């Protein structure tokens, strides 16, 4: 089973840069999209492109136009699709969509960024406070979960190029990193990428400022996070950087798991 997670920073923009041409070549079973920045009626104007052949396509838009939004493209039709994480504030922002296949759930998640203001940082904390118990419930349910997406947190020093300079910046704050520590340690979820790849300089996002992309001054903030039941199931992982579809790179994981 191959699952791709990609923050497109505007799916229409990514499409113009060749994202869907690339996607067709990947033979992915599920593609998880974040930051569609579009309403579904806008995408239906070009169904051939935004509802690619061979996939069952599901979108969860933000109420605010041109903002947030998540999507799932599934080669196999899901038994059920769930939109929203059960929190009115964040469900209005289009941040969670889940497809269920038997005992497997695949989620496209877009956690808030707090970099624009202290107000948004507090919103991010509220979302984290809501979502951790939700993940504890996922674990307790006995289902297998793959939660893909832009979590907007770099976990450890190895996950960010300039870690010393970012200790007081959103995305690498002690409170955010401790939250992931708890998720991976105490709760027992698994960082799928690190199951296979322990190397430094493995980033999925680069600022548009300066020469961040050219110099690989990046952050690893996109993840496949797995319930403990899936530990050991990751067989291969890669970050696709040969082309640029947005300020993020697609994160591809292959699993020893029949879909």
Image (spheres, grey):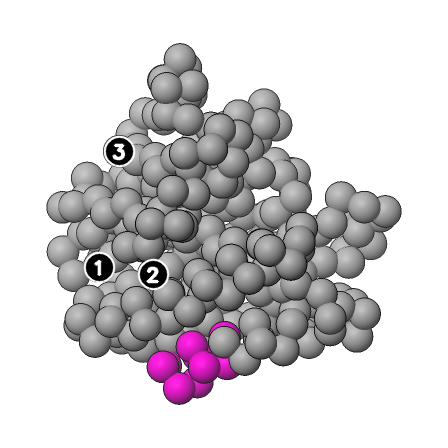
Q: CA distance from mark 3 to mark 1?
A: 16 Å
- Label 1 near label 2: C-beta < 8 Å? yes
Q: Is residue 211 left or right of residue 76?
A: right
**Mark 2 Cα-neighbour bin, 10 Å: few <14, some 14–19, many ≥20:** many
Of the residues under marks 2 and 1, which one precedes in the sequence?
A: 1
Of the residues under marks 3 and 1, which one precedes in the sequence?
A: 3
Asked if residue 238 shows in the view, the reply is: no
**Mark 1 Cα-neighbour bin, 10 Å: few <14, some 14–19, many ≥20:** some
Q: Which element type, helix, strand or loop, lies under badge 1?
A: strand
Q: Which element type, helix, strand or loop, lies under badge 3?
A: strand
Of the residues under marks 2 and 3, which one precedes in the sequence?
A: 3
Asked if residue 171 shows in the view, the reply is: yes
Q: Nearer the viewer, residue 132 or 78?
A: 132
185 magenta-colored:
yes
Question: Residue at position x 84%, y 48% from top?
Answer: 211
Q: CA distance from mark 2 to mark 3?
A: 18 Å
- Kindly identify which numbered label has been placed on residue 12: none
Q: Is residue 77 left or right of residue 51?
A: left
Residue 6: % across, % down: 50, 45
Residue 168: % across, % down: 73, 71
- Label 1 near label 3: C-beta < 8 Å? no
Seen in the picture, residue 206 relative to 235 is either above or below; the reply is: above
Q: Which residue is mark 2?
A: 146
Q: Which residue is mark 3?
A: 56
Q: Which residues are magenta?
A: 180-188
- Kindly identify which numbered label has been placed on residue 104: 1
Q: Residue furthest bottom?
A: 186
Question: Residue at position x 66%, y 43% from top?
Answer: 247
Q: CA distance from mark 2 to mark 1?
A: 8 Å
């Amino acid at each position: 089973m191959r699952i791709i997670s990609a923050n497109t920073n505007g799916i229409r923009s990514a499409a113009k840069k060749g994202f869907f041409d690339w996607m067709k070549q990947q033979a992915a079973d599920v593609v998880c999209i974040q930051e569609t920045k579009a309403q579904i009626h806008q995408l239906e104007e070009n169904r051939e492109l935004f509802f690619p052949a061979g996939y069952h396509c599901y979108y969860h838009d933000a109420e605010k136009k041109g903002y947030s939004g998540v999507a799932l493209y599934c080669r196999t039709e899901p038994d059920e699709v769930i939109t929203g994480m059960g929190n009115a504030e964040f469900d209005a922002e289009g941040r969670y969509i889940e497809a269920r296949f038997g005992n497997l759930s695949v989620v496209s998640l877009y956690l808030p960024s707090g970099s624009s203001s202290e107000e948004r940082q507090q919103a991010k904390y509220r979302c984290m406070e809501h979502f951790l118990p939700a993940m504890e419930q996922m674990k307790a349910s006995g289902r297998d979960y793959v939660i893909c997406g832009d979590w907007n947190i770099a976990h450890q020093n190895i996950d960010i190029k300039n870690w010393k300079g970012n200790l007081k910046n959103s995305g690498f704050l002690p409170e955010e990193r401790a939250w992931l520590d708890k998720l991976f340690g105490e709760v027992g979820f698994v960082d799928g990428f690190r199951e296979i790849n322990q190397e430094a300089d493995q980033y999925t996002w680069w600022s548009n400022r300066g020469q961040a992309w050219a110099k690989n001054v990046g952050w690893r903030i996109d993840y496949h996070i797995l319930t403990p039941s899936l530990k050991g199931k990751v067989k291969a992982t890669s970050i696709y950087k040969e082309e640029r579809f947005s300020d993020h790179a697609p994160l591809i994981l292959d699993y020893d798991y029949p879909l």
